[in-house]
Image (cartoon, rainbow, N blue to C red):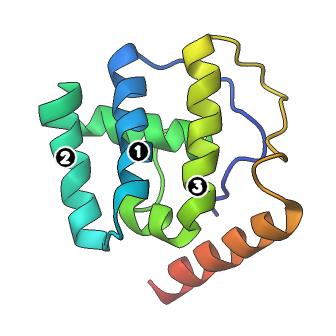
């Protein structure tokens, strides 16, 4: 079972991984993505913009969003969570960039309990149908 983090996980990422996640967060807002185009964009971001291996990008995203080193397919996961995953990603990135990560900082200001439930249900549907 995979669940979007409710608190900022205590993770350590390389600068290039943080850069890649920041680019993803920005690009998620730029247009409406489908699973294939977003998946392809992850590889473009990793190789061309952040100059890291795609696996490093995926690992960083899973650590930040799920507090795990791997997880579900990232593109459908982010598309199911929509704006909330992007907001969580941005909050965590801000804390990573400030280097003030504390493991028990709530992100309730970004995601309300109702929205957390909605995200969970969307993600659950995604994996039940898969």
| Residue 66 percent location from the top left of the image | 60, 47
Circle 3 SS class? helix
Tell me which label, 3 or 2, sits earlier in the chain. Answer: 2
| Number of numbered markers | 3
Q: Which residue bears the numbered disc 3?
A: 85
Tell me which label, 1 or 3, sits earlier in the chain. Answer: 1
Q: CA distance from mark 3 to mark 2?
A: 19 Å
In the image, is residue 35 above or below residue 39? below
In the image, is residue 9 above or below residue 24? above
Task: Report whether 61 appears left or right of 2.
Answer: left
The residue mark sitting in front, 1 or 2, is 1
Q: Quadrant of residue 24?
A: top left
| Residue 83 percent location from the top left of the image | 57, 61
Q: Which residue bears the numbered disc 2?
A: 43
Question: Image point 46% across, 68% down: which residue?
Answer: 79
The residue mark sitting in front, 3 or 2, is 3
| Residue 85 percent location from the top left of the image | 58, 55
Task: Report whether 25 appears left or right of 113.
Answer: left
Residues tagged 1 and 2 counted as in contact (Cβ below 8 A):
no
Q: Which residue bears the numbered disc 1?
A: 26
Question: Image point 84% across, 59% down: which residue?
Answer: 112
The answer to whether any part of residue 78 appears in the image is yes
């Amino acid at each position: 079972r995979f669940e979007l983090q409710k608190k900022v996980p205590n993770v350590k990422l390389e600068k290039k991984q943080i850069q890649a996640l920041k680019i993803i967060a920005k690009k998620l807002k730029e247009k409406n993505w489908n699973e294939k185009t977003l998946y392809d964009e992850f590889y473009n971001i990793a190789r061309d913009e952040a100059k890291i291996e795609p696996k490093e990008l995926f690992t960083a995203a899973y650590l930040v969003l799920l507090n795990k080193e791997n997880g579900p397919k990232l593109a459908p996961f982010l598309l199911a969570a929509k704006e909330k995953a992007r907001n969580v990603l941005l909050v965590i990135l801000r804390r990573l960039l400030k280097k003030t990560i504390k493991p028990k900082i709530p992100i309730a200001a970004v995601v309300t309990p109702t929205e957390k439930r909605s995200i969970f249900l969307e993600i659950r549907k995604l994996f039940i149908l898969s």
